[in-house]
Amino acid sequence: MINFLQNAIDALSLGSLYALVALGIGLLFGILRLVNFAHGDFITIGAYSLILPSTNVVATMLIGSWHWELLIPVVCAIVVVVALATDALVFRPLRRSTAPTLMIASFAVSYVIQNGVLMMYGARPKAVNLWSALTTQITIGGLREPVLQVVTIATTVALMVGLSLFLRHARWGVQMRAAAEDFRMAQYLGVRGNFVIGLAFAVSGILAAAVSLLFLAQTGALSNVMGVPLALFAFVAVVVGGMGSLPGAVVGGFLVGIVTTMLQAYLPPDLRVFRDAFTFTFVIIVLLVRPAGLIPSRSIVERV
Amino acid sequence: MSLQVSWRGLITPLLLIAGVAVVTFLGVLGGDQVQTSLVEMLIRMVVVVGIWVFVGNSGIISFGHVGFMCVGAYAAAWATVDPNWKSIMLTGLPDWLQNGQYPFPFAVIGGAVLAAVVALLLGAAIMRLSGIAASIATFAFLMIVNSVYSNWDSVTGGTSSIIGIPTVVGPWVAFGFAAGAILLAYAFKVSRYGLMLRASREDEVAAKASAINIVRVRLVAFVISAAIVGLGGALWAHFLGVLTADSFYLSLCFITLAMLVVGGLGSLSGAVLGVIVVTIVVEVLRTLEGGVTLGKTMISLPPGSQEIGLGIVLALIMIFRPTGLTRGQEVQWPKRWSRPAAPSVEAATAPSLGE
């Protein structure tokens, strides 16, 4: 029982990371119909922004050694700037393009960022010690959990509540929802298209920055492709949840996290190495049963 | 279907093959380095033309075809690697594969057939999906292949590579297969199935209303396309002589898609041209990375600029020429020698690739 609870908390913690990444991807998809492969690289940039740019094997902390109250906003700002820059340089000129074009363009952006990081910081992964205090374990009635798991879950919940309050009540949030519902109609009603899209990129940048800090504190290692697996799992989470639906993205993220953790825990040992294969097979099955995802968004259905 | 193809219709594949032959001939004259790049390019051409059969005609971006390449490559390696090595390293293979050693043509066909069978099973499931859901499903397939092939130690060697595959693919062998792939892809394009599939790409609802069984035509294209790509994988194995599962992953997926998009998704000529152009861009950047002496100074780009350059080229093409270099047109014999062919209305108004 204790064992199961432990797995459940691990699952929730991993699921909440995926949910945060999926939210960032889902937000842009909802408004722009952009499947943003570069989101994982936003996460990578957030993590790398903590250290001094150099190709040395040993990482020297710069921003990473600051107090967290200063560190978090600065990292968020850096990732937001990068996200806005990709929009201005690549996605804005492609506004009228189709979804596949945008998807491949984001693939190109991702490729450029990954290799740019490689160029600036070198190819070898670097060990980084961020917030080591969070890895201490707390014991609650036989249950031993690192504080970090709890912090991850709490941060996710806080960000989700914040985002949904913003989308529901703030003026800009309402505009974003309107744009996601029907972009052209929203524009006719006075919503500035590029502003709303920029806002979506900024919010997704903040979400990416949060993930990069949580993830780095967990793994303690930097690599130029560290964000890729997160983004890949989040994609399928977005699709499984229902493209364009934010609650769907969250549900999908948690579902993928839970499935992955449970497979890891309960698959027979010799099948355990194929965990990812099982996860992705599960994804294909979900898509077959519900091609529009678990919580389909109404606006995505094409009317004829 | 071949009866309906007029002589004029055959011009396109013949021109393409002639063009590739010229490139091959020029490459063969070059040094070792050039020849290696040439063979690499021709094999990628087989793969990209294979991907085009599905992606170009259906309009569905597939990230999974590199997975078929992996399947084909390993199948071929299983057939041709020395049985002594297999009996030590690949203990999970069935007896006839583990103890036998088969000739190269058998390996290539085996690679194509296995990829086609996998595509049939996968396609039967996912061809019902459209648009982005279908793309993501192919992505999931790529992840599954990667996860299985890099962990199934007794059959694929896991993360250690398969070595000792006979390296029998040279420039002209690769050219022969590229030419074959071009002919096959063109035959599919002008066939009834190709036409029906392109109709479904333009307008799914209208195609359905015209009694086109979209799932079936997509599936046919998917299987043919996977077979060609699997064959490309087999060639790849017999060119490198060494296989690792991780080489068939996101990077290769990116390069092959970049080739398709640069040339233009809309036409077979685009697939062929894209491979050549991207290869040239990459080779130039690679040479610059290695360092070029200009007068007395040595200029060299930092490592990684090859990839960054390719990404930037791709982004620029998508922004300034969204339908690719060929604008979705096939190469044709010029109508009048004196005047360059004016761009057709269709090309000028085509909104973007994939439409």
Image (tube, coloured by chain):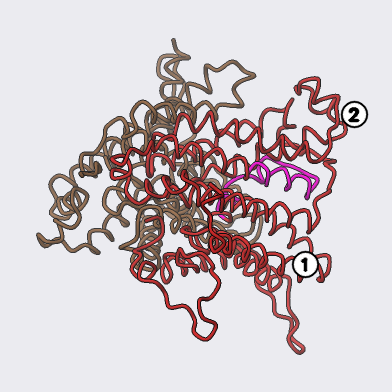
Chain colours: A brown, B red
Q: Callout 1: residue from which chain? A: B
Determine the CA span between mark 1 and mark 2: 34 Å
Q: Earlier in the sequence, mark 1 or mark 2?
A: 1
Relative image position of residue B280 (x, y in whole percent): 65, 69
The numbered mark at residue B34 is 1
Front residue of this view, candidates B224 and B149: B224
Relative to A167, say whether A82 is above or below. below
Residue B78 visible in the current orientation? yes
Instruction: Please name whichever residue, A136 or A177, is drawn nearer the observer in this view of the structure.
Output: A177
Dominant SS of magenta comes to helix
B47 with respect to A298 (left or right): right
Residue A266 is situated, as x and y percent measured from the top left of the image, at 52, 16
> Would you say B82 lies left or right of B203 here?
right
Q: Residue furthest right?
A: B84
Residue A87, horizontal then vertical, whole percent: 36, 63
Q: Secondary structure at mark 2?
A: helix
Task: Check the image and name the residue furthest to the top.
Answer: A1
Residue type indicated by callout 2: Asn
Q: Chain of mark 2?
A: B
Quadrant of the frame with the C terminus of chain B: bottom left
**Residue highlighted by disc 2:** B84
Magenta-tinted stretch: B229-254
Residue B326 horizontal side relative to residue B32, left or right: left
